[in-house]
Image (spheres, rainbow, N blue to C red):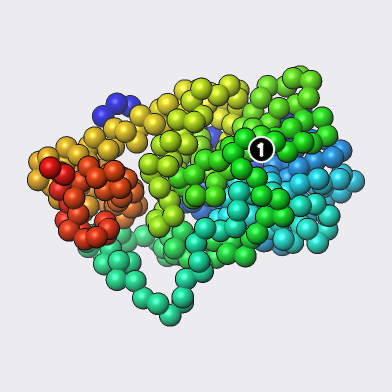
Amino acid sequence: MASGPQFNLDHEVVYGTVEHVSPLVDRVTCENPSRFTFKGTGTYIVGTDDVMVIDPGPPEDGHVDALVAALDGRTVTHFLITHTHGDHSPAAATLKEHFDAPTVGFGPHPLDRPDPNASSDDEEAGFGFDEDDDEEPEEQVESENEGYKSDHAHDWDFVPDMVVAHGDVIQGAGFSVEALHTPGHISNHLCFSLADKHAQYDRSLFSGDHVMGWSTTIIPPPDGSLNAYLDSLRLLVPRDEAVYYPTHGAPITAPQALVPALLGHREARTEQILACLGDGIDTIKEMVLRMYTHVDKKLYNAAGASVMSHLLALHEIERITCSDDQPKPRSIYGLAV
């Protein structure tokens, strides 16, 4: 497989302080580091006196207080929401108690709140790895349990005051922001392209969780879609933004190199899976054991989730068969005839 994207793990933050990342953009980082959020959620403040706030973050008191202090003396015109995962949008509700500004998003959370009394055979089944293969320190297990399957990982209550669609433009004070619908990580994901009125500064893109410089993007079922994600990456290829500001991690200063590399990485992984099926390797567990020989066993379940997202995409376009109506962790897979 060709060499993958080059990630940047060099990202130091001081929680709760205002960092000036460009003449038009400040960032305040929440102290919620994890395997999903890297060093934490970076909330962006765009503008000078009249500002927009992008991804207010989780409803943690310390982060909200830091944002209120950073916004003191400024007028907030909009709260822009890239998507409704719990580390991005919930603090908007609390900030609206301090600032009279509308929330802007593609729509409410796309999933219904799950029944806490319902059981899931799929989750109980797992991918078939021995428990010993996934032993981790207690704090890491807790972090895993706080991932995309947990209730608080989703902002079930968010409903935007302003609904925007792909290509809609929100006007600011001396700048404008264009909404780009980029489903894949979640179906209501937006990126926001910033252009200042006088073209004094380079165009930039607030990429949420769609493109990150420290890691590939998770495509969590049931709403995540790899096919939609790849289409959304292709949408960015011809664009001319000079820098991306992801919600997690450092600014991406060479997006024209990173985005094609992310595409190539996913396409190469798909070819690996098809090759496994061609060789009679027909379960996710066996595919992980063949494809991820270079990773720690503790990452096998995460690798299994990634393989499953590819199998879901291949099943959707009828390139593979599945022993169940829909791909499941322990389904048997094959190449379509």
Q: Position of residue 306 (x, y in %)?
A: 33, 48
- Identify the residue shown where x is 39% and y is 56%: 221
Number of numbered labels in the structure image: 1
Q: Quadrant of residue 131?
A: bottom left
Name the residue rendered at 72%, 55% in the picture.
161
Q: Nearer the viewer, residue 239 or 34?
A: 239
**Image spot of residue 142 (x, y percent):** 46, 64
Q: Quadrant of the C terminus?
A: top left
The quadrant the N terminus occupies is top left
Task: Categorize mark 1 by other alpha carbons within 10 Å: few (<14), some (14-19), many (20+).
Answer: some
Most foreground residue, 51 or 17: 51
- Compared to residue 314, the image places residue 152 above or below, namely below
- The residue wearing badge 1 is 168
State the residue lying farthest toward the bottom: 117
Question: What amino acid is found at the position of numbered circle 1 in the picture?
Answer: Asp
Snapshot quadrant of residue 89: bottom right
In the picture provided, is 104 more to the left or to the right than 12?
right
In the depicted structure, whether residue 234 falls above or below residue 164 = above
Q: Position of residue 19 (x, y in %)?
A: 72, 38
Q: Where does the image place residue 78, in percent across and percent down from the top left? A: 76, 46
With 194 as the anchor, is 233 left or right in this view? Answer: left
Q: Residue furthest right?
A: 73
User: Could one spot residue 247 in this view of the protein?
Assistant: no
Looking at the image, residue 169 sits to the left or right of residue 209; the answer is right
Q: Is residue 262 visible?
A: yes
In which quadrant of the rendered view does residue 271 lie? top left
Residue at 36% in and 76% down: 119
> Is label 1 in a helix, a strand or a loop?
loop
Q: Residue at x 43, y 41 (%)?
A: 229
